[in-house]
């Protein structure tokens, strides 16, 4: 029986798959780790949480794939009880905290949206960032189950004790050094004043306070 990593996009599914499988994959063209196993359970995606999916399509894909016993594969599907039952162990990279949501939005903006929005200027750009960031306030939540380890994305980014526990305290320094190099903008001293962070706080202000953000 295989193991599953369930994660929303741009939250280190490729990195974690490499670490747990003991592999070293190439960097892909979107700033991530292009692990083969990282794509085996992908059947769709969502800017928020991918809950509306047909588990039969996922089963069909998995049944047509050769996987070694105990290997880890990844999916963007939020795991229901039915999906959890198919695997020996499940790790959920969750975004229940504001910090995890912010890191996810920052990576998505940096690698996906920013290259597409180079022509946007002024208030048009500000509005586009703020409104899109609202999608990332919806959490990819944890699941409380004996088979499941819930790991916040912020714990991966910040290499906390919780992250080390989830990977059984493996020596993964080479993996983390490379990942930090690829995503150096997350660790830059100016990160907290970046467009991604400012737009996230504006989105959070509007959604949580229920009123428009006022620009001084």
Image (cartoon, rainbow, N blue to C red):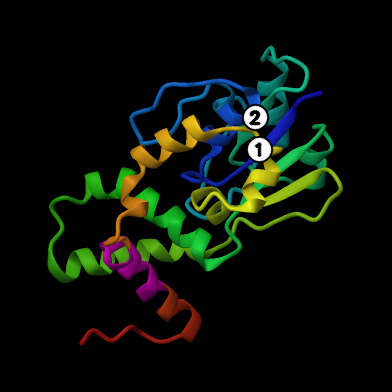
Q: Is residue 101 above or below residue 22?
A: below
Magenta-drawn segment: 192-203
150 sits left or right of 27 in the view: right
Q: Nearer the viewer, residue 145 or 211?
A: 145
Q: Quadrant of residue 96?
A: bottom right
Task: Decide whether residue 197 is among the magenta residues.
Answer: yes
Asked if residue 152 lies in the magenta stretch, the reply is no
Residue drawn at the location 46% of the way across and 77% of the way down: 207
Location of residue 69 with respect to 20 vertically, above or below: above
Camera sees residue 58: yes
Is there CB contact under 8 Å for labels 2 and 1?
A: yes
Q: From the viewer's perspective, tell me whether residue 170 is left or right of residue 173.
A: right
Residue nearest the observer in this picture, 206 or 11: 11
Picture residue at 70% right of the left edge, 15% below the top: 67
Is 135 placed left or right of 71 in the picture? left
In the rendered view of the protein, which quadrant contains the N terminus? top right
Query: On the image, which quarter does residue 42 sit in?
Result: top right
Taken as a whole, is the magenta stretch helix, strand or loop? Answer: helix
């Amino acid at each position: 029986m295989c193991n599953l990593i369930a994660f929303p996009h741009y939250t280190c599914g490729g990195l974690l798959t490499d670490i747990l499988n003991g592999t070293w994959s190439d960097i892909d063209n979107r700033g991530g780790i292009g692990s083969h196993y990282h794509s085996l359970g992908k059947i769709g995606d969502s800017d928020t949480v991918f809950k509306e999916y047909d588990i039969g399509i996922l089963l069909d894909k998995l049944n047509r794939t050769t996987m070694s016993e105990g290997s880890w594969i990844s999916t963007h599907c939020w795991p229901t009880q039915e999906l959890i039952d198919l695997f020996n162990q499940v790790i959920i990279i969750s975004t229940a905290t504001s910090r995890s949501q912010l890191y996810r939005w920052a990576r998505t903006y940096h690698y996906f949206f920013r290259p597409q929005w180079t022509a946007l200027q002024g208030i048009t750009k500000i509005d586009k960032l703020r409104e899109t960031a609202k999608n990332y306030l919806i959490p990819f939540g944890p699941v409380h189950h004996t088979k499941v380890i819930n790991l916040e994305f912020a714990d991966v980014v910040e290499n906390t004790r919780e992250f080390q526990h989830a990977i059984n305290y493996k020596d993964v320094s080479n993996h983390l050094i490379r990942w930090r190099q690829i995503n150096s903008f997350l660790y830059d001293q100016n990160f907290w004043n970046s467009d991604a962070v400012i737009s996230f706080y504006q989105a959070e202000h509007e959604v949580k306070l229920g009123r428009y953000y006022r620009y001084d």
